[in-house]
Image (cartoon, rainbow, N blue to C red):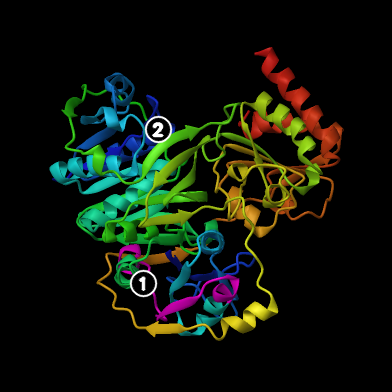
Amino acid sequence: MKIAVCIKQVPDTSVRVKIAPDGKSIDAAGVEHVINPYDEYALEEAVRLKEQVAGSEITLVSLVPDKAQQIVLKALAIGADKAVHIKADNVPNDSLAVAKVLAEELKLGSYDMIFFGKKAVDYDNHQVGAIVAEILNLPCITGCTHYEYSGGKITAYREIEGGVEVYEVVPPVVFTQEKGPHEVRYPQLRELMAARKKPIATKQPNFSAPIMQTVELSYPPPRPAGKIVGKGVEAVPELVRLLREEAKVI
Amino acid sequence: MNSVLVFVEQRQGRIKQSSLEALSEGRRLAKKIGSTVSALVIGNQIDSLVNEISKFGPDFVILVQHNALANYSPDGYRDAFLEVVKQEQPKVILVAGTAMGKDIAPRIAAKIDAGLATDCLAIEITDDAIIATRPVFAGKVLQKLKITSSTKIATLKPNTFRTEEVSTKAPSIKKITPQIDPSKWRAVLRGIQEPEAKKQDVSEASVIVSGGRGMKGPEGYKILEDLATALGGTVGASRAAVDAGWRPHAEQVGQTGKIVSPNLYVACGISGAVQHQVGMANSKVIVAINKDPEAPIFKFADYGIVGDLFEVIPALTREVKKLYGKE
């Protein structure tokens, strides 16, 4: 099976982000980047499928800056076989323009399965995977937690409010990945070394004219300082009074 | 040609509250540009939903019905939705930011080359653009995103926009039998698994009682369930609790879980890492119960109690029951 996994980098989720002086972008200075967590979950699922279906191969497709090669190498170490690095220092904040570039590349590979994270935790747009599927006219199931493969069919599990939708689909297909039951494997030094020998093709993107643009970034208003109502069980009646009379939420 | 189209989501004949929020916002936007608002409902045997939808003042209700559309189908709903979009040529399409809404909106955007803003908190409209305010970096930053395609699409964050019942003239009803061919659908829904005890989802709940590492194990959540029941809410969890296998991922609040916006969020035994904080910062009121007075959660909680949660929570449950019992 030919599998593609699309990955991108995002700022480390444990740090605060700083708005750049232009007021429209994020200050990249000193920011550590990591693989988007949902892309990593997707890669783990792809590696599991590869282990199950003999002769499978995983190609990473990554639209990231030149200097983000570390991200690609780490993903190769987790279990991909080769990569296409589409180099762009300024990726427009326009999902349609991004999806068109990725679709163009993915079309060339005739993949049986294409995985995306359900969203990237930078701009939280939550749309590129589904748009790529529509451009390529492929079936797409979004927000899947995990999969079962048998007899050429894939069963995909998708979380909805208060339940799980179970879908059956025959490849070729696009999946977007929710956090699921499987922990992402941690690459060992040996695998990190081996990743350096895996092929990485590089390309340049051609973006279409954007129809979306950021006009302003700002920080949300800080929450007003809260108060400690008290200590232990004795504080409970006062808390209930405050929730009732001051906050009016119960 | 200049209208606002709102997708009103129903499952099993029940309309999503967040869709009614979207419909109310759609009506407000239509008013600003002197246009009309249409409510689009897709399903099967859903005529009876017109009454409820009419209360929120749409000019038109468009019912698209087919027996193959009784349940959600990504292919089927997309085709039915697109058929209406092509007829109506709306200027703006609003969709509630639910699992279904987030699935269908990008498909429509792709098919008509429209810009799409996800999880909007506010929308400004002008003659040729919309400017959507939306959380990015999990809410650490707010983005104003301008969309200039001829049709603009937005998904709206649940529990954010005000619903508004209005008494206007009854809407006109359009009924459509869509030109769809289920034999061509590729992703086939085989079923919907529901937990034995039906539970409100954290993304839709107005009260969430959430537990973290301080619950010490899965058994600890019994007292949170009791409190959630007393408050008419639901139980949530931190990433630590989910990764430990104490609670399912569906309940996780935070950067790799759900970004929630309840009226009341009670954080129990949660220290308050940035990744959790961003998931619950949109709550109207936050209460923290933690034995460590230095826990970061107290810096952004509105009300805090320092103490042993295994004593404080049962006492809180009793007090809430006492309060509601009086009424």
User: Which residue is nearer to you in this view: B305 or B45?
Assistant: B45
Q: Position of residue A71 (x, y in %)?
A: 54, 76
Give the amino acid type for the residue marked by disc 1 in the picture.
Pro
- Element at badge 1? loop
Judge whether residue A31 is colored magenta.
no
User: Mark 2 falls within which chain?
Assistant: B
Residue A214 is drawn in which quadrant?
Answer: bottom left
- Which region shows up in magenta? A74-98
User: Which residue is nearer to you in this view: A224 or A154?
Assistant: A154
Total labels drawn: 2
Q: Position of residue B96 (x, y in %)?
A: 39, 41
Q: Position of residue A225 (x, y in %)?
A: 68, 51
Task: For residue A243, say whether it is visible.
Answer: yes
Give the amino acid type for the residue marked by disc 2 in the picture.
Thr
Q: Which callout, 1 or 2, points to the residue nearer the camera?
A: 1
For label 1, the residue is A92
For label 2, the residue is B163
Q: Position of residue B185 (x, y in %)?
A: 29, 43
Whether discs 1 and 2 lie on one chain: the answer is: no
Q: Distance between the Cα atoms at labels 1 and 2?
A: 35 Å
